[in-house]
Amino acid sequence: MNALLFQRPIWFTTSPLMFEEEAQDREEFIYHRPVLVRETIELLAPRAGALVLDATCGGGGHSEAILKTGADVLALDQDPDAIAEATNRLSEFGNRVTLRRANFRHADRVLDELEVGKIGGAILDLGVSSRQLENAERGFSLMRNGPLDMRMDPSSDKTAGAIINTYSEEELTRLFRDLGEEPAARRIASAIVKQRKTEPFCETLGLARAIEKIVGRHGRRHPATQVFQALRMEVNDELGALEQGLRVVTERLEPGARIAVISFHSLEDRMVKNFFRDRSREYLDRPEWPEPRPNKERDLLVITSRPVEPSENEQRFNARARSAKLRVAEKLG
C-alpha cells in the first residue's frame, strides 16, 4: 500500500527553549517552519516508491520534501489541527500520502491497521509547532495569555493547570529540576504551592509573572521558559513517548532503511544518542563477565557520529532552529 510512506516525524521543529522568540515569526506566519530539511532528506535517503513514516508531521513540511523524492508517506500527528493543515498542504500528492491522528509511540498500531509490515524510513521531529505557540488557547505561550493547557492532544486529560495546582512541592521541584533543568526549581515550587492556596493558577501569564517575581529577570530569555518547558513535557509525557516510539519505529524498519530524529532538548538528544549507541554495539561487556558477549539487540548502524546542526544561515532565517540536533541510524539486515 504505497499510500503509506514513511516520512521523518517532523515533531514540530520549534525549539522548546525559544518561547521568548515566538514573536519573530509574525510577519509572514506559516503553520510551521521545519528545520534541517535538506540535511534530513540527504541522510534519510528515501527510495522512490518506499513508504516513509513521518511520525510527527506538523504542518507537513518534511512530508512534502519526502514525497518530492518519489517516496510515499504515512504521516502521523496527535494534534488534530496539524492533521488538518497537513491534509490541505499535501492534497496534491493524492493517495501517495496517508494521514492518521496518532502519537508516534503507537505507530505500530496504525501500521497494523493499514496492514503494513515494514517501512522504508522514518523521521521524528521533536518539538513544538509555531501554530501551537501562536495559539494562546493552547496554553503553550509565554507571550499571550491563555488557559494553562499545553496538551498536544486536546483529548487527553492532564493539563498544565492540573499539574501546577495539584502536584506537591516535592513533585514540582523534581519536575522543574529534571525536565526543565531549572536551577531555582525548589524556590519556584515552594512559592507556587504557597500562592495557589489563596488563588489557583489558571492562566499562562499569571504563572509566568509569578515566576518572574520569584527569580527576577536577567537577560533576554523569560525566567519562566524552563518551567513552561517542564510542564509541557510532563503534560504530554514526551520522554516516555520518545523512549517507546524509538523502539516501536525501529522494529518496523526494513533492512537498509533509516530513522532520523531531530531533537531540541538535551534530555531528548541524550536518549536518542544512547538508544542508537546501545542498538549498534557489536559486543557488550560487564565487569562480572569473563569476556565480552555479542549484543543480541544489535540492529542499527549509526550514520551520524555527531549530531548535525542547522547552518548559520538557517539559524538566522529561523531562530527556533538554534538548538536543533539531527541524528540518523540505519537498520541492519
Image (cartoon, helix red, strand yellow):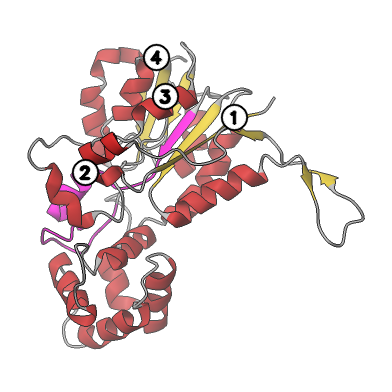
Query: Badge 2: few (under 14), some or many (20 or more) residues near its Cα, within 10 Å?
Result: many
Check the picture and name the quadrant holding the C terminus: top right
Spatial separation of the CA atoms under disc 3 and disc 2: 22 Å
The reply, left or right, for residue 182 in relation to residue 269 is: left
Specify start and end residues of the magenta stretch as a single range. Answer: 122-151
Of residue 48 and residue 323, the one placed in the foreground of this image is 323
Figure check: 237 above or below 153: below
Q: Is residue 37 left or right of residue 110?
A: left
Q: CA distance from mark 2 to mark 4?
A: 26 Å
State how far apart marks 3 and 1 are (Cα). 14 Å
Q: Secondary structure at mark 2?
A: helix
C-alpha distance separating marks 1 and 4 = 19 Å
Q: Earlier in the sequence, mark 3 or mark 1?
A: 3
Q: Amino acid at mark 3?
A: Ile
Residue at x 9%, y 35% (from the top left corner): 28
**Quick one: label 1 or label 4, which is nearer the N terminus?**
4
* Residue marked by disc 3: 41
* Residue visible at 26% across and 44% down in the picture: 129
Front-most of residues 55 and 187: 187
Q: Which mark is drawn over residue 69?
A: 4
> Going by the image, does 135 lie left or right of 162?
left
Q: Residue beneath label 2, please? A: 130
Q: Amino acid at mark 4?
A: Thr
